[in-house]
Amino acid sequence: MSSNKIIETFLNPKSVAVIGASKNPLKGGHRIVDNLVTNKFKGKIYPINPNSDGELFGLEFKKSVLDIEEDIDLAVFYVPNRKIPKILEECIQKGIKGVIIEASGFEEVGDKGLELRDQILKITDNFRKIRIMGPNCMGLTRIDGDSDAEDKGGFFTSFAVFYKYKRGNIAIISQSGMLNGGYLMYLLEKYPDLAIRYSCSIGNKMDLSETDFLEYFMDDPTVNVIAVYLESFKDPRKFIQLCRKMKEKIDKTIILVKGGITLQGQKATSSHTGALAEDSQLIHAIIKQSGVIHANNFHELFQFARTFSMMYNENKNLPKQGNISLITGSGGAGTIVADITAKYGLKFPNFSENAYHSLLEIFPEWMPPNRFTLIDFWPAMEKAMMNNTNPGDIMKTVYEILIKDDKIEGILQMMFCSKRWYSTNYKQLAKILNSAPKPVFFWLIGEIEEVERVSQLMSEHNIPTFPSLEDMIKNFWILVQDSKNKNKSYV
Amino acid sequence: MSSNKIIETFLNPKSVAVIGASKNPLKGGHRIVDNLVTNKFKGKIYPINPNSDGELFGLEFKKSVLDIEEDIDLAVFYVPNRKIPKILEECIQKGIKGVIIEASGFEEVGDKGLELRDQILKITDNFRKIRIMGPNCMGLTRIDGDSDAEDKGGFFTSFAVFYKYKRGNIAIISQSGMLNGGYLMYLLEKYPDLAIRYSCSIGNKMDLSETDFLEYFMDDPTVNVIAVYLESFKDPRKFIQLCRKMKEKIDKTIILVKGGITLQGQKATSSHTGALAEDSQLIHAIIKQSGVIHANNFHELFQFARTFSMMYNENKNLPKQGNISLITGSGGAGTIVADITAKYGLKFPNFSENAYHSLLEIFPEWMPPNRFTLIDFWPAMEKAMMNNTNPGDIMKTVYEILIKDDKIEGILQMMFCSKRWYSTNYKQLAKILNSAPKPVFFWLIGEIEEVERVSQLMSEHNIPTFPSLEDMIKNFWILVQDSKNKNKSYV
């Protein structure tokens, strides 16, 4: 079976047996079934447990997969690892195509785990008889519709039950279970604009690995952004090859966090996924040659993914030179942005003559704007208020000037959101910025309720907002990086 | 008058005239009076405006300070800058000791602004006749009690009206108005555990500067943490001298963000506070010699300040070697923490024999804990659940072991907060950690509501929680830095 076809079976099975399903809600085997049922998996679900009778969520318990008459595509194991060999043999006998093993206790625990692995290799005839995801993983997730959609019906095999999510264009490949578990659950609730298509916890990758999923996502038009966390490269040469191929694609970006870059980190990985230590120079060389966007931690990984996800959703031209404009209501914020952007190689060009003359008109005489594209709009606001002009109109004018000026590739803004003070027509603004050909990013501060309202509104228009200046700048900088890699816009 | 005495007058006046007070709520002069009244300033307030009659918040308008019979300590100017010379002369005539000038349009706008400055120097006889804060600033704040306290009565001269705050041990000195304006207002609402004593917006520091406030805070026992944002050093030698003197104090820490470190940043400062460009090597030398904690941006500045504020509130021993323990429920998170801590020079020592044997008991045989102090407690949790032991008790045991082991100077934990899954007795835990002699930091994830509840509970016990792994680690690292600077604990 081709690699893409087997991954298709894992991500989109017609029927699944949950081995180790349990009536006890504290057990993982219970929550996997809960997750499938809660999220309306449209295929068949078979709870399997030799010690259970009756039903679970209205589904009848079976003692073994061999008791099921219908064909089964996939089995999910949530059983102690010593029980795996026997059950695996039954699965092969049943003709099941793939198994997700969520138990740990393999390479990462030394000799005993290695013995078990060898046993599995023998039983499966080196994975010729059946394919394996994991072990030591948290399953797979495919999101077909938002969590509040009537016909959502995705595929959820994490033992963290997902209640709130939005379907989108991001795929996750991870050697940390929490990226398809509690942490992802948390992110989906906290950042409702993080729109996910797949999350794949690959664990110790005894058989299937990151490269199988990368290959699959390369041809999947529903995926634009691939967020990857690895503790080891299963096949560095193939990884580099696939990433480079991905760079040729106009509609794909890969972001990578690599765990175990330091000696201290490698000590941690070996007790986690049993990954063998990799030379840190080699790791850096692989990252560089693959041309992926490198993130330092999970916060960056998901924030970068969200940013790219939004850029792909719109018709944006990516910045190539890093020429930005900043709109700020605070000179101090302007100074810090200027310092941090300099660190990231972003620049403030001078305004074109036309743009500058248009700006002069809205600024007071005693405080003209800068010649370069850092705009402290406070004096313009004060002038507007003195003349009883709506400050929101001034903001609109500033944006029209900046959008027209071709030298400016992207706009960053510090926005103070307040109901008490004055009110901007954010809906109107969001529409203007959404249809602009260049990216616009916001750092929002102000009254919390208003910040949250504006942030959500901007998200709905694919305009990213950030909790800090540095985050805003870093996220703009990765667009420049990606554009240099691809030398293409997203259109 | 001694420097400390004049600062005392500025931060704790008995009476204040607000010149440019206005009935129009869009004007700054209105909001300054609003701020004083809302926050129950206990001294006298005199709204001054030659064009206004009647009352503002029940206070009678006067045309000029000369129309007031009583003595006045301080005047706050919210008037166009061309009107300043005449009003300043009246203030001197009235015997007012100090003036806060919030208007901009001085050094930062070139020749015209410089002329005005020279005029002021002449009128005040080089500040012999009256002392000046600003210009181009957002006033001063002194917090005497929490915003919901009956007898709060602080002093608030920002034109951002503060509604929600907590009195604490942090003092801010800033050349960016927003740190006593909209941004601070936002932070106080968003992070209720950010406990502030003073915020001083020093603007262009024509007369009084950062060093005057540093001197004052040195002797003020209510201040432990001084968060500073500067675009220039008024007197680098004195700054270094004061910072070094502060290091001798057991109960003080200074954190500095310096704007205008890059050429691009310096271009921005010159249009903001009119600061002259400083050589970037010189800046770095000043930062190094002063021995302050250096923050890169406002997010770090306030997060670091909060961390130190909490450490000073408790009886914690500061880490000297950087020897930490990590408790994680995710091996992936453990790996990333191990990598990032390595970058910051933090280390995981090996457990003492006693500690290791106690840990072995709560871990399953097939998955013993690491010999070094990185604990993936998931297997211990699973064992507890299998044995029907409360996982919360396991957590308590782990903490008791880590607190006892002297090699470990601090504990970091990734904590998954959930009502659905199992429930930890957080109150009990917070009490144990609060009374531990070493710092304990949390990265919280899980169900949003539960995360917020636990975060608040921990805050109340001065246990800081963080939104990301990297933030948690960076904030621990600055404790090591500060302890090396001081070679002392906080007790």
Image (spheres, coloured by chain):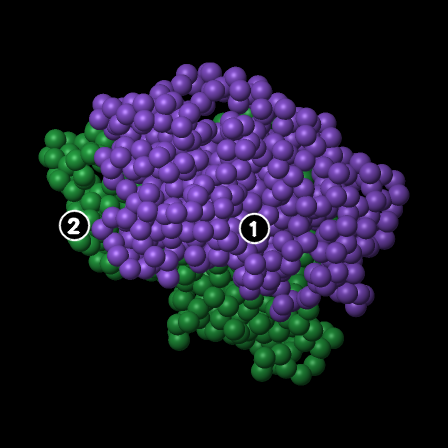
Chain colours: A green, B purple
Q: Can you say whether A129 is above or below B119 in the image?
A: below
Which residue position is annotated with label 2?
Answer: A387
Q: Nearer the viewer, residue A178 or A234?
A: A178
Image-based side of B87 in relation to B37, left or right: left
Q: Is residue A207 visible?
A: no
The circle on residue B477 is none
- Residue B431, image x and y in percent? 75, 56
> What residue is shown at x 44% (from left), y 29% (from top)?
B208
- What is the distance, in whole Å, between disc 2 and disc 1 at their CAs? 38 Å
Q: Can you say whether A71 is above or below B225 in the image?
A: below
Q: Quadrant of residue A274?
A: top right
Q: Nearer the viewer, residue B135 or B322?
A: B135
> What residue is shown at x 46% (from left), y 33% (from top)?
B229
Amino acid of disc 2? Asn
Same chain under badges 2 and 1? The reply is no
- Residue A400, image x and y in percent? 17, 46
Which mark is in front, 2 or 1?
A: 1
Which residue position is annotated with label 1?
Answer: B144
Q: Is residue B440 visible?
A: yes
Q: Quadrant of residue B25?
A: bottom left
Q: Can you say whether A186 is above or below A444 in the image?
A: below
Q: Which element is circle 2 on?
A: loop
> What residue is shown at x 85% (from left), y 53% (from top)?
B361
- Residue B430, image x and y in percent? 71, 56
Q: Can you say whether A119 is above or below B339 in the image?
A: below
Amino acid of disc 1? Asp
Q: Nearer the viewer, residue A291 or B172?
A: B172
> What residue is shown at x 25% (from left), y 48% (from top)?
B50
Label 1 environment density (alpha carbons within 10 Å; few <14, some 14–19, many ≥20): many
